Image (cartoon, rainbow, N blue to C red):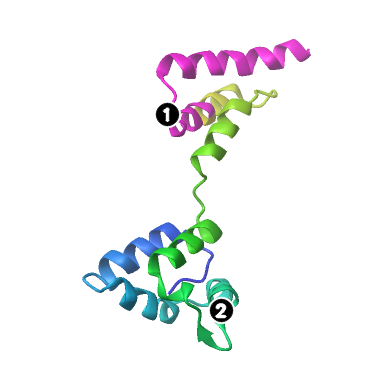
Amino acid sequence: MFDGKEDAKKFLYVYENVVKKGKTEDEKADKLVDFLKADAFNYYFYYFTEDNAPTEEAKSFQLVKKAMLEKFSTKKTDAETMREALNLRYVGENIKEFIFKAGKLYKEANFSEELKFGMIQQAIRSDQALM
């Protein structure tokens, strides 16, 4: 069951590749609602039903999957990751924690090692310039 609190990507992967493995797209779309509750069910009901019946969009598992991922996925988009990585600044917190956080974020953004090093230097320098 998916309630919208955990990551939709993981739920949909299990649903699609384990629970409904070998089923057609129509069958996956038709039975998805049986696995939703709370916020996830409310979202589905609001956007994919009309007059208490599934809309045409609800019959497309890929379309519903995309909408559920956009609404309930905890993973940031590539653009969000890139924006966060480029705007990261050191503001006086624990330097080791900052470098760890920066390294992880820059890895997610697929920065090269040279670029990671340069970005960390720039982030730290920007804090020193304010002093």
Quarter holding residue 119: top right
The x, y position of residue 66, in whole percent, is 46, 60
| Amino acid type assigned to the residue bearing label 2 in the image | Phe
The quadrant in which residue 27 appears is bottom left
Residue 42 shows in the view: yes
Up the image or down, 62 lies above or below 52; here it is above
Q: Residue furthest bottom?
A: 52
Which residue position is annotated with label 1? 110
The residue stretch that appears in magenta: 102-131
51, above or below 76, in the image:
below
Residue 46 part of the magenta segment: no
Mark 2 neighbour density, 10 Å: few (under 14) some (14–19) many (20 or more): some
Is 30 in front, or is 96? 30
Q: Residues within 10 Å of mark 1 (few under 14, many from 20)?
A: some
Residue for badge 2: 45
Which amino acid type is marked by label 1?
Answer: Asn
